[in-house]
Image (spheres, helix red, strand yellow):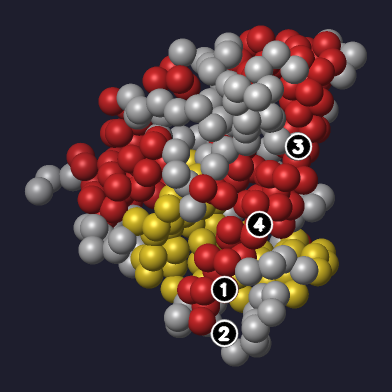
Amino acid sequence: MMLKNILSRVCGLGLIALCFATPGVHADEAEVHLYLTRHGKTMLNVSDRVQGWSDAVLTPDGIAVAQDLGRGLKDTSFASVYSSDSGRAMETARVVQAFSGQTQLPLQIDPRLREFNFGSYEADLNTTLWNDAARFDGLAMEDWLKKFTPKRFADTVAAMDRRRGTTHGKTWPAEDYATITKRLINALTEIASQQARRGGGKVLVVSHGLAIAAVVDTLAPGNQYPLHKPLTNASITEVVYRDGRFEVLTFNEMKYVKAGQAAAKAPQ
């Protein structure tokens, strides 16, 4: 579904929503609650390497936190489940489904839900990428971190990757922010509007840390969420879709994982 007009507006209780004028959206469509979830910890996370379109399997801790999330979501009935096509996201989704008792739902894969693509920096050390980005912007690392936004980061990496030019033709070039947010918002708009026409409900969407931060940054411009900090693995960011509009309700929430941890320790 093509994304047309984007209008920002202030909603009740200071929440900020983004309005999407999408074809075929009617005021009487049912609400859809999207549970945007970051995948569990991976081997590349542990080795502190850049992990965008490159991939790695979940670590034991990554599997355990996905299991805890599944237990914590046992009483949350999902109408559908989506994942990016990255292995770490699909593995997380399947573990959450298994431990929430919702394996009857088909896992629907959408490559538009991928993490940022970092081009020639993929699988490089994070410290290399961060130091290069700070130097590129002419800032000390401490100052660069203070000015960090998903947009600034993505656009800086894309510009650095173009300047490097070392692997173009061999791998995909790094994406700029406009490219990233277009694919993410198009995907979520399509997922939400389709589910609304089916009667609404709750949808689990397993994606990635920077991708979810970019979604929140786009849907809630001017928000006070700490987008400069990495999202916690298996955290939930809840977004509601009603009458063709998105509204961010929670960000980087760990209450479901904590509930799952408590359930695992409870006497059976």
Label annotation for residue 185: 4
Of residue 259 and residue 85, the one placed in the foreground of this image is: 85
Secondary structure category for the residue under label 1: helix
Query: Dot 3 surroundings within 10 Å: few (below 14), some, or many (20 or more)?
Result: many
Towards the viewer: 267 or 20: 20
List the residue tagged with mark 2. Answer: 29
Name which of mark 3 and mark 4 comes first in the sequence: 3
Mark number for residue 176? Answer: 3
In the structure shown, which secondary structural element does the residue marked by tag 3 occupy? Answer: loop
Label 2 is placed on what type of residue?
A: Glu
Gap in angstroms between the C-alphas marked 1 and 2: 9 Å
Q: Nearer the viewer, residue 60 or 83?
A: 83
Near mark 1 (Cα within 10 A), the count class, few <14, some 14-19 or many ≥20, is: many
Q: For the view shown, which residue lies furthest in the bottom direction?
A: 28
* Rendered image: mark on residue 193: 1
Taking the spot 39% from the left edge, 65% from the top edge, the residue there is 80
